[in-house]
């Protein structure tokens, strides 16, 4: 789906003000055991490196201040993968040695954060008139406005996790309508909201390539998007190199309950789709998304390369 706005120390920069006063989004009064265990792993790496000061580590990371490093090391904040990788390099460790531990801890924290579903307006059922049985809870969206208004409303109700894709031939700035702009803003606002909840937004961005070279407009947008979102600790984006001369099927997976599928093509603003609210159906797309995510390059690393 479109986006209006989903790690090396050389481009991981400190937000205005140095990041010292940035609230610990995702922090909790009682951190999950996996979060505390991962913090212990990072503290051991610091000891192995000769126990550099938190200030020295923050300077080398170049993406957060000393207080943020302290919160990460004390287990009060679970770091994003980008911050984890920057920390590893700051203490002389290969970030890939931490990836499996980070993924495992992140998964445990996200699963623990999923509470009872919030009350939602039931969607109309697709049913078989002959059998008289409901097949799936679904809704059809005839145009751009209907789709993005529904997806934006559901994103604002999310409890803990949003997974989205954007694989189109042109950057989002060349598609934007009021409805889509409000949807994209809702996702980033949700990710950046000060909350004690464990929140996570992951976005897969398909960057069109021809003969191994990225589309210039899309690459420029991707760099701007990274600059606009790098300070949001609960937001991550990875890149899928896209060689097909066509839009991909795009989706938004919200918590563990609803899937939005978007279909585009022809005129740039043309888009329609559907949503299906069914736990089993959701697991299929969640597994597909996670399989892709595990193989992709973080947006910051892609831009640096």
Image: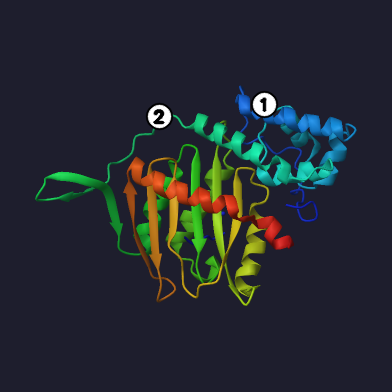
- Does residue 197 appear in this view? no
Name the residue located 53 percent from the left edge and 66 percent from the top edge: 172
Disc marking residue 36: 1
- The answer to which quarter of the image holds residue 274 is bottom left
Q: x%, y% of residue 83?
A: 71, 43
- C-beta proximity under 8 Å, tags 1 and 2: no
Q: How is the image coloured?
A: rainbow
Give the structural element (helix, strand or loop) at label 2.
loop
Q: Is residue 168 left or right of residue 295?
A: left
Query: Which of disc 2 and disc 1 is earlier in sequence?
Result: 1
Name the residue located 27 percent from the left edge and 42 percent from the top edge: 122
Disc marking residue 72: none
Q: x%, y% of residue 113?
A: 51, 31
- Does residue 228 appear in this view? yes
Where is 207 relative to 260, above or below? below
Q: CA distance from mark 1 to mark 2?
A: 24 Å
Q: x%, y% of residue 202?
A: 55, 49
Disc 2 crowd rating (10 Å Cα; few below 14, some 14-19, many 20+) is few
- The answer to which quarter of the image holds residue 210 is bottom right
Give the structural element (helix, strand or loop) at label 1.
helix
Q: Nearer the viewer, mark 1 or mark 2?
A: 1
The residue tagged 2 is 116
Where is 5 relative to 55, above or below? below
- Which residue occupies the extreme left position in the image? 130
Name the residue located 74 percent from the left edge and 48 percent from the top edge: 15
Disc 1 crowd rating (10 Å Cα; few below 14, some 14-19, many 20+) is many
Q: x%, y% of residue 90?
A: 83, 43
Q: Is residue 95 left or right of residue 292?
A: right
- Which residue occupies the extreme top position in the image? 30
Quarter containing the C terminus: bottom right
């Amino acid at each position: 789906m479109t986006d209006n706005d989903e790690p090396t120390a050389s481009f991981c920069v400190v937000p205005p003000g140095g990041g010292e006063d940035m609230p610990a989004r995702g922090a909790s009064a009682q951190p999950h055991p996996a979060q505390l265990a991962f913090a212990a792993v990072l503290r051991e790496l610091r000891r192995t490196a000769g126990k550099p000061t938190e200030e020295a580590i923050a300077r080398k990371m170049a993406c957060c201040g000393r207080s943020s490093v302290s919160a990460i090391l004390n287990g009060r904040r679970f770091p994003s993968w980008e911050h984890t990788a920057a920390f590893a390099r700051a203490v002389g460790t290969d970030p890939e040695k931490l990836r499996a531990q980070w993924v495992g801890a992140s998964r445990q924290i996200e699963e623990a954060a999923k509470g009872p579903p919030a009350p939602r307006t039931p969607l109309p059922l697709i049913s078989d008139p002959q059998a008289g049985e409901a097949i799936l809870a679904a809704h059809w969206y005839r145009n751009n406005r209907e789709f993005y208004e529904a997806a934006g409303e559901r994103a604002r109700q999310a409890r803990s996790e949003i997974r989205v894709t954007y694989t189109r031939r042109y950057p989002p700035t060349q598609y934007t309508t009021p409805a889509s702009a409000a949807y994209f803003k809702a996702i980033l606002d949700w990710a950046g909201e000060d909350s004690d909840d464990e929140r996570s937004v992951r976005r897969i961005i398909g960057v069109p390539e021809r003969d191994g070279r990225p589309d210039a407009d899309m690459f420029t947008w991707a760099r701007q998007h990274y600059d606009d979102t790098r300070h949001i600790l609960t937001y991550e984006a990875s890149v899928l190199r896209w060689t097909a001369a066509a839009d991909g099927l795009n989706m938004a997976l919200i918590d563990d309950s609803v899937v939005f599928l978007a279909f585009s093509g022809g005129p740039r603003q043309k888009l329609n789709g559907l949503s299906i609210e069914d736990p089993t159906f959701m697991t299929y797309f969640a597994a597909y998304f996670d399989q892709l995510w595990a193989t992709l390059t973080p947006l910051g690393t892609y831009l640096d390369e």
